[in-house]
C-alpha cells in the first residue's frame, strides 16, 4: 500500500521540475499542459477514486508550495479532478481504461474540470468572462494536456494503440 | 445513531472524503496571506528551487543567446543614446536637485536568472536565483533592460519569488509620462489596465507609462509600457487604458533586481496593494 503512494510521489518530483522549467518553454500564450494532472488521472484510474483524491490532494498541496502559486488552488482542483476521474474507475476494465483512446477522453474531461476550477479560483479577483474561462482556462489547456497523454496510452498498451 | 452515521460514512465514503478534502483545501485557500503559510511556501520554494536550477542550467543550453554581432550593434546604439542623454542629464541635473528628485540610475542592480515559472493566466510569477544572501528584500522591483517586470514577493536564502505584472494580485502606482497623470495599473487576466482615467485628460495612444513618484514600492521613472488602447466607460466620462508592457514577461529569462531599500513604514502600507 505504501509502495502504491510512494511511486506516484517519486514520479511527481521530475514531473514538477518539468512543469516549472520546461513547460513555460512550450506554452502558447499561457496555455500549457499539466503533467502532474496526467499523473493524478492515471493513478486514479489504476487505484480508484479514494486513492486518487488523496493523491491529488497531497500532490496539489506540494505543487502549490513549490510553484509559488495560490496555496490550495491546485490542491482543490486536483482533488475534484480525481473525484471526477474516479467515476471511470473499474477494476475489470483496467486495461481498457488505461491503454485505449478512452483514457484520452477521460483525461480531457478531468483536465477540463481541473483547469477550469483552477482558472476560476485564480481569476476570482478579476472580471474575466465565463466564456473566456471555459475556453482559455478550460478547453485549450485540456486539449494540450490530452495530447501529452498519447505517449502514456502507447506505453501502457502492450499492443500499442487500440 | 452512531451506527447510522457509521453506515452512512461507509456507504458514501468517497463523497464524505471528497467533502472533507474540499473543505480543507478551501480553508487553506483562505489562509494564503497568513504568515505561517508564507513561511511554509518560502521554505518549500527554497528547497525545490535547487532542482529547478539544475534543470534550468541544462535547458539554458538550448535557449537563444544574443550573438556577439548583435551585442556590438546594441553597444553602438547605446553609445549614441548615451551621448544624447548625457547632454540632457547636464541640463536636468540642476532642476532635479531643486525638486529633490530620486535618481533611479543610482540604485545598484543585481543580475539574476529566471529558473522556473508557473504558467497561468493571472498568476504570473517566477523564481529567480538570487535571494537574501545577495541582500535581496521583499518588495524590491525586478526589471529587464526593457522595463519593469515585477516585484520580489517572497525571499529565501538563495531564491526569490517574483510576482510579475501579469499577476492580478499586483497593483502598481504609475504615471502617464507626457501629461503626468497618475493611475493604478492592474492585470485583468488579458491586459494591463489603468482604470477610470477621466476623458478630460489628453491621453494618446503610444504615451509612455512609468512608475509613479508617489510609489515607494518602486523607484520613480521605471518604464512600464505604452498605451495601446483607450476604452470608454461610464457614458464616456472615464477611460480604461490598455497598456502594452515594454518587457516581454512570458519570454523573460534574465532580469535585474533593483536594490532599492524602501522606507519600511511606507512600504508596509503600500504592500497592501499586493494582496
Image (tube, helix red, strand yellow):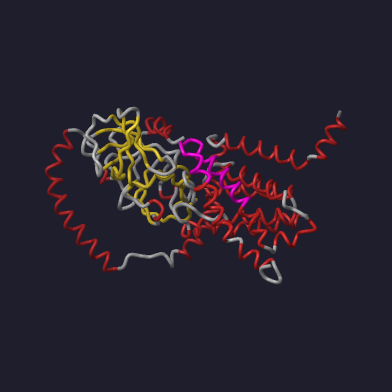
Per the rendered image, the range of residues in magenta is A109-134
Is A111 contained in the magenta span?
Answer: yes
Q: Which residue is found at the position 55% from the left and 58% from the top?
A: A17
Residue A144 shown left or right of residue B199 in the figure: right
Q: What is the x, y in percent for residue A59?
A: 63, 50
Please indicate whether residue B188 sits to the left or right of residue B17 in the image: left
Q: Which residue is drawn at 25% across and 46% down?
A: B105
Name the spot of residue B12 as percent of width and height, x first: 79, 39
Residue B244 is a magenta residue: no
Is residue B260 among the parts visible in the rendering? yes
Say how many tags the image has.
0
Residue B209: % across, % down: 28, 41
**Which residue appears at 36% of the width and 65% of the height?**
B65
Looking at the picture, does residue A5 appear above or below residue B226?
Answer: below
Q: Quadrant of the N terminus of chain B?
A: top right
In the picture provided, is A17 more to the left or to the right than A25? right
Amino acid at each position: 500500500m505504501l509502495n502504491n503512494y510512494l511511486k506516484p510521489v517519486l514520479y511527481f518530483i521530475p514531473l514538477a521540475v518539468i512543469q516549472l522549467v520546461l513547460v513555460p518553454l512550450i506554452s502558447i500564450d499561457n496555455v500549457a499542459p499539466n503533467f502532474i494532472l496526467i499523473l493524478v488521472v492515471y493513478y486514479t484510474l489504476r487505484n480508484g477514486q479514494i486513492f486518487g483524491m488523496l493523491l491529488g490532494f497531497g500532490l496539489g498541496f506540494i505543487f502549490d508550495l513549490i510553484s509559488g502559486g495560490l496555496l490550495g488552488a491546485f490542491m482543490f482542483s486536483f482533488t475534484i479532478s480525481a473525484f471526477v476521474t474516479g467515476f471511470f474507475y473499474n477494476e475489470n476494465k483496467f486495461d481498457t481504461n488505461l491503454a485505449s483512446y478512452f483514457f484520452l477522453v477521460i483525461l480531457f474531461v478531468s483536465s477540463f474540470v481541473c483547469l477550469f476550477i483552477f482558472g476560476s479560483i485564480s481569476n476570482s479577483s478579476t472580471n474575466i468572462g465565463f466564456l473566456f474561462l471555459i475556453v482559455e482556462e478550460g478547453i485549450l489547456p485540456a486539449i494540450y494536456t490530452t495530447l501529452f497523454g498519447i505517449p502514456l496510452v502507447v506505453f501502457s498498451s502492450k499492443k500499442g494503440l487500440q | 445513531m452512531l451506527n447510522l452515521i457509521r453506515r452512512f460514512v461507509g456507504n458514501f465514503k468517497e463523497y464524505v472524503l471528497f467533502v472533507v478534502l474540499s473543505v480543507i483545501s478551501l480553508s487553506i485557500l483562505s489562509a494564503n496571506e497568513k504568515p505561517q503559510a508564507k513561511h511554509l511556501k518560502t521554505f518549500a520554494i527554497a528547497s525545490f528551487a535547487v532542482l529547478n536550477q539544475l534543470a534550468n542550467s541544462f535547458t539554458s543550453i538550448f535557449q537563444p543567446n544574443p550573438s556577439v554581432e548583435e551585442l556590438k550593434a546594441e553597444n553602438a546604439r547605446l553609445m549614441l543614446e548615451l551621448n544624447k542623454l548625457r547632454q540632457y542629464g547636464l541640463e536636468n541635473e540642476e532642476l532635479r536637485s531643486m525638486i529633490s528628485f530620486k535618481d533611479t540610475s543610482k540604485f545598484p542592480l543585481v543580475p539574476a536568472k529566471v529558473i522556473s515559472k508557473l504558467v497561468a493566466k493571472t498568476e504570473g510569477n517566477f523564481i529567480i536565483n538570487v535571494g537574501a544572501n545577495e541582500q535581496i528584500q521583499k518588495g524590491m522591483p525586478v526589471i529587464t533592460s526593457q522595463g519593469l517586470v515585477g516585484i520580489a514577493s517572497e525571499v529565501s536564502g538563495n531564491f526569490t519569488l517574483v510576482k510579475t505584472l501579469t499577476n492580478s494580485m499586483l497593483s502598481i502606482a504609475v504615471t502617464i509620462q507626457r501629461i503626468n497623470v497618475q493611475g493604478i495599473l492592474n492585470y485583468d487576466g488579458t491586459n494591463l489596465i489603468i482604470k477610470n482615467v477621466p476623458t478630460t485628460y489628453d491621453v494618446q495612444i503610444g504615451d509612455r507609462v512609468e512608475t509613479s513618484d508617489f510609489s515607494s514600492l518602486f523607484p520613480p521613472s521605471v518604464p512600464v509600457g505604452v498605451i495601446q488602447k483607450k476604452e470608454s466607460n461610464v457614458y464616456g466620462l472615464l477611460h480604461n487604458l490598455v497598456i502594452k508592457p515594454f518587457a516581454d514577461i512570458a519570454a523573460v529569462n534574465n532580469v535585474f533586481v533593483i536594490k532599492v531599500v524602501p522606507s519600511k513604514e511606507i512600504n508596509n502600507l503600500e504592500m497592501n496593494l499586493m494582496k
